[in-house]
Image (cartoon, rainbow, N blue to C red):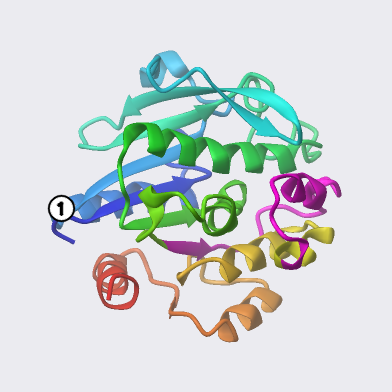
Amino acid sequence: MTGKKVLYVSSEVIPYLPNNDISTLTYSLPKVVNKNGGQTRIFIPKYGLINERRHQLHEVIRLSGMNLIIDDLDMPLIIKVASIPKERMQVYFIDNDEYFKNRLLDSDKKKKLYDDNDERAIFFAKGVVETIKRLNWTPDIIHVHGWIASLMPLYLKQYYKDEPLFKESKVVTSIYNKSFDDTLNSGLIDKIKFDEIEEAYIDGLKTPNYSNLMKVAIDFSDGLIKGSQELPAELEDYLANCEKPVLDYQYPEAFAEAYTDFYTTKILK
């Protein structure tokens, strides 16, 4: 991994959010890459439950100030940053008062999915890409984790397909067990089509549930990783038939070598 740049785009990372499969891997993987001579950056949403004072977040003025168009609406992009204590890892937080301030991850306190989760996912994908463009940092690998990052592969390969910064970047998506029930807003497909992405690529999102979001992510990724020991049967089947490199689930004590080998021999070959 010497000299390679890996961008982690995730729904969660410890210590900013509770320990689970996604937050643990998004913390552990960059450490492994850094230890093996690579460079990493981590992006997550700035949910309202993240304590800015405790974790010493601060706004990056030179990166903030952009407006992203989401379904014909101008939405301000705010970028904040913090360093994980005792680690050489910076975390960038994608923020917007309407989408993330005073918000939890995907549902309110009554466990009801936010009606604008579809827009939050589009905003997060665009926000990460626009920030990386401002940083002028070309990743060799973009590794995606979690439902809110699931539109990243689609947007990178379609909306940003002519962006030279990502011309050689490879996209890896980790697929985890189902993280929410029900479906996102049924208007998701029209909001993606507004960005001139062909309907043929997103037909499955007419029913925007968790599995269909992941299927679109699989379609536009260069490699896949099973991030949970158990996955929904339809996603197991989809992975089995995707004709792309797939790394099976790795137990925590053995993941480091398996992941770096997957990166180097299957993705960067």
Q: How far from the left and from the top, in percent, is residue 126?
A: 56, 40
Q: Where is residue 196 in the image (x, y as percent from the top left)?
A: 70, 50
> Can residue 14 be seen?
no
Image side of residue 248 versus residue 66, left or right: left
Q: Who's the residue at 20% across and 37% down the image?
A: 88
Q: Is residue 135 above or below residue 166?
A: above
Q: Residue at x 65, y 64 (%)?
A: 216
Residue 16 in the image, given as x and y percentages of width and height: 44, 32
Q: Residue at x 56, y 62 (%)?
A: 176
How would you rate the neighbour count of disc 1 (Cα within 10 Å): few for under 14, some for 14-19, many for 20 or more?
few
Mark 1: amino acid: Lys
> Is 24 included in the stretch rendered in magenta?
no
Left or right position of 118 against 236: right
From this view, report whether residue 45 is shown above or below residue 101: below
Quadrant containing the N terminus is bottom left
Is the residue 105 above or below the residue 251 in the image?
above
* 24 or 223: nearer the viewer: 223
User: Could you tell me if residue 169 is visible in this image?
Assistant: yes
Q: In this view, does 164 lie above or below 264?
A: above
In the picture of the structure, the residue carrying the numbered disc 1 is 35
Q: In which quarter of the image is the C terminus?
A: bottom left
Residue span colored magenta: 171-200
Q: Which residue is drawn at 33% across and 33% down?
A: 135
